[in-house]
């Protein structure tokens, strides 16, 4: 048994020598090489333990890991005073000593929080920009993407809408942005700003990170029929998933298509799925009294739950605007 024990001890010492060599190569420090006889291998601990010379001289039994022994020393020179500064909230901020031996000015918690906030804001703005392209047509397919339409829709905000025309509708739309729950129907005369207010809601919610989808009802139904006719049904399935899952769906001019039984079934399934998922929908129409004729009685019953109706009757403001071709 003794030769075996001797061989094991020799193996341990050789392993320690290899570890020490690696440590010395990575962290060269004159006069810091430990005495091999002072190293103790504890079978119950994976890291070799070392009793520093000062500890041995004092008779201390405290053991330290090799990593602690070879830790970088404290800086030999004090930090430059110009690197120290005071934050009104965090107090005195001391400089940071780098392993390379250089002092640098350190930021406080306030600055780090503000930098992270700015990064998050930048990412959110980039996301909102991409989502506008998807929201205003891209989600229906690439053929529906139009930079001119996206640009026009981006400028439809609460700031560019004349609240004096319909203050009640304006306030309802803004309140919805703060708590986008339930369904809204804006109805009334042509050119009263129904689409403008719904798009303003979308633009505000996109900047808050809310997933929205906008489409004219005839455009949506046409895209639905096109994807359904395709041999590969993947596009049709993806369109349905987008319809059912988005946080807010806006259907503009829902009364502009001649209704059919197939269209009624489409709207019933759409509003039923969104109702079960507790997703909000906004509709605009010029014929609210005839809404059941265009979407079907069953679909109207589904969307009427948690629904708020806003009437907008007045002059056509488009007649007052100039337009450059």
Image: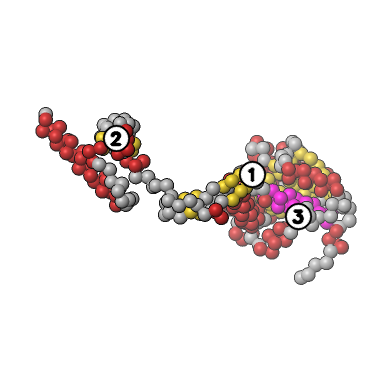
Provide residue 4's location: percent of width, then percent of height: 13, 33
Horizontal and vertical percent position of residue 139: 62, 53
Dots 1 and 3: beta carbons under 8 Å? no
The Cα atoms of the two marked residues, 1 and 3, are separated by 37 Å
Residue 179 vs residue 37, the one in the foreground: 37
Q: Residue at x 77, y 46 (%)?
A: 174
**Residue 319 highlighted magenta (yes or no):** no
Quadrant assignment for the C terminus: bottom right
Q: Earlier in the sequence, mark 2 or mark 3?
A: 2
- What kind of element bears circle 2? helix
Residue 161: horizontal and vertical position, in percent? 81, 55
Residue 98's disc number: none
Q: Position of residue 291 (x, y in %)?
A: 78, 45
Residue 238 visible in image: no
Q: Report the side of 276 relative to 195 (left or right).
A: left
Compared with residue 307, is residue 76 higher up or lower down, i.e. above or below?
below
Query: Residue 56 bears which disc, if any?
Result: 2
Q: Which residue is mark 1?
A: 89
What residue is rendered at 78% in x and 70% in y? 324
Residue that carries the numbered disc 3 in the rendered image: 157
Query: Residue at horizontal 56%, vertical 55%?
Result: 82
Q: Is residue 91 left or right of residue 24?
A: right
The magenta-colored residue range is 189-206
Classed neighbour count for the residue bearing mark 1: other residues with Cα under 10 Å, few (<14), some (14–19), many (≥20)? few
Looking at the image, is 323 positioned above or below residue 130? below
First-in-chain label (1 vs 2)? 2
**Circle 3 — which element?**
loop
């Amino acid at each position: 048994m003794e030769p075996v024990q001797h061989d094991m001890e020799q193996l341990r010492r050789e392993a320690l020598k290899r570890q020490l060599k690696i440590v010395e190569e990575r962290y060269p420090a004159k006069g810091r090489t430990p005495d091999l006889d002072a190293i103790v291998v504890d079978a119950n601990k994976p890291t070799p333990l070392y009793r520093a010379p000062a500890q041995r001289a004092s008779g201390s039994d405290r053991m330290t890991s090799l990593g602690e022994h070879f830790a970088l020393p404290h800086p030999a020179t004090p930090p430059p005073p110009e690197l120290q500064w005071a934050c009104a909230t965090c107090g005195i901020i001391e400089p940071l000593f780098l392993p390379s031996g250089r002092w640098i000015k350190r930021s406080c918690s306030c600055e780090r929080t503000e930098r992270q906030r700015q990064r998050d804001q930048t990412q959110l703005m980039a996301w909102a920009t991409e989502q506008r392209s998807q929201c205003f047509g891209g989600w229906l397919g690439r053929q529906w993407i139009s930079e001119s339409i996206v640009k026009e829709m981006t400028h439809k905000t609460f700031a560019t809408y004349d609240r004096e025309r319909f203050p009640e509708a304006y306030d309802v739309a803004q309140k919805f942005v703060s708590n986008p729950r339930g369904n809204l129907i804006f109805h009334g005369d042509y050119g009263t700003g129904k689409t403008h207010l719904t798009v303003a809601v979308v633009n505000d919610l996109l900047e808050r990170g809310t997933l929205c989808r906008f489409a004219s009802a005839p455009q949506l139904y046409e895209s639905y029929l096109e994807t359904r006719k395709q041999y590969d049904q993947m596009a049709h399935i993806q369109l349905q998933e987008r319809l059912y899952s988005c946080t807010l769906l806006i259907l503009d001019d829902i009364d502009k298509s001649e209704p059919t039984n197939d269209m009624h079934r489409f709207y019933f399934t759409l509003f039923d799925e969104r109702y079960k998922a507790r997703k909000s929908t906004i509709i605009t129409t010029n014929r609210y009294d005839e809404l059941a004729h265009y979407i079907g009685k069953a679909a109207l019953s589904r969307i009427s739950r948690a629904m708020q109706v806003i009437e907008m009757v007045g002059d056509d403001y488009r007649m007052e605007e100039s337009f450059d071709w």
